[in-house]
Image: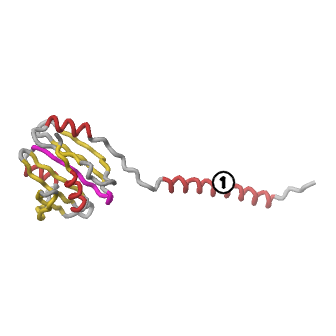
Amino acid sequence: MSSYDRANSTFGSLVIAMGIIVGILLVMALVVAGRREEHIPSVDYRLDAAELRDTAAYTTYVPGESLPDGWVATSTNLDTDGPVSWSLGFATPGDRHAELAMSDADPDDFIAETTRQGEPNGSSEVGGESWERFEREADPDEKPRRALVKREEGATVIVAGSASFDELETLADSLDPQT
């Protein structure tokens, strides 16, 4: 006949409970480790680009094949009521934000709004064309805002964001006119 030993029974239950807890923690660690890579949702902007092309009375642009891998279109906003305006947001390979914006609104107002009151800061030569540079220093809670601006007949094209000027120049250089 075996005798019941309360001390061994309690220790055995403790070992089983600890094993279950460790198992749960390992499963949770594996799930979290598998999700470490950030997934940036992308949008298809082709419909807005086509509507812009058909609606706007100015030359419109879209990023072309020369835009390198790693650029992800994350937002599109087309406004055809009043001034025809479009903005297309991107996550850059450098984990920054860039935006292509164009409009036939008053150029000075559109530039001030899109650059967030940025100040002129020289120029960049992109694809054989001169683009004005604008920059707004960062507030303590925000990232700096940089912009490249090209004034065209009837419209203003702006590439802006927290991206570096090099990244903004890459986006600007990729722009192809829509026909």
- Left or right of 38: which side holds 9? right
Q: Is-magenta flag for residue 147? A: no
Q: Position of residue 120 (x, y in %)?
A: 11, 62
Quadrant in which the N terminus is drawn: bottom right
Q: How many labels, in total?
A: 1
Task: Name the residue rendered at 27%, 49% in the picture.
Answer: 65
Task: Name the residue rendered at 9%, 51% in the picture.
Answer: 151
Q: Position of residue 169 (x, y in %)?
A: 20, 58
Task: Name the residue rendered at 20%, 35% in the picture.
Answer: 51
Q: Nearer the viewer, residue 4 or 62?
A: 62
Q: Residues within 10 Å of mark 1 (few under 14, many from 20)?
A: few
Quadrant in which the C terminus is drawn: top left
Range of magenta residues: 93-104
Q: Which residue is mark 1?
A: 20
Q: Nearer the viewer, residue 104 or 28?
A: 104
Coloration of the structure image: secondary structure
- Left or right of 52: which side holds 36? right
Question: From this viewpoint, which residue is outermost toward the right?
Answer: 1
Q: Position of residue 156 (x, y in %)?
A: 11, 49
Above or below 111: residue 49: above
Q: Nearer the viewer, residue 98 or 109?
A: 98
- Which element is circle 1 on? helix
Quarter of the figure with residue 28: bottom right
Q: Nearer the viewer, residue 10 or 28?
A: 28
Q: Is-magenta flag for residue 95? A: yes
Q: Amino acid at mark 1?
A: Ile
Quarter of the figure with residue 38: bottom left
Above or below 47: residue 61: below
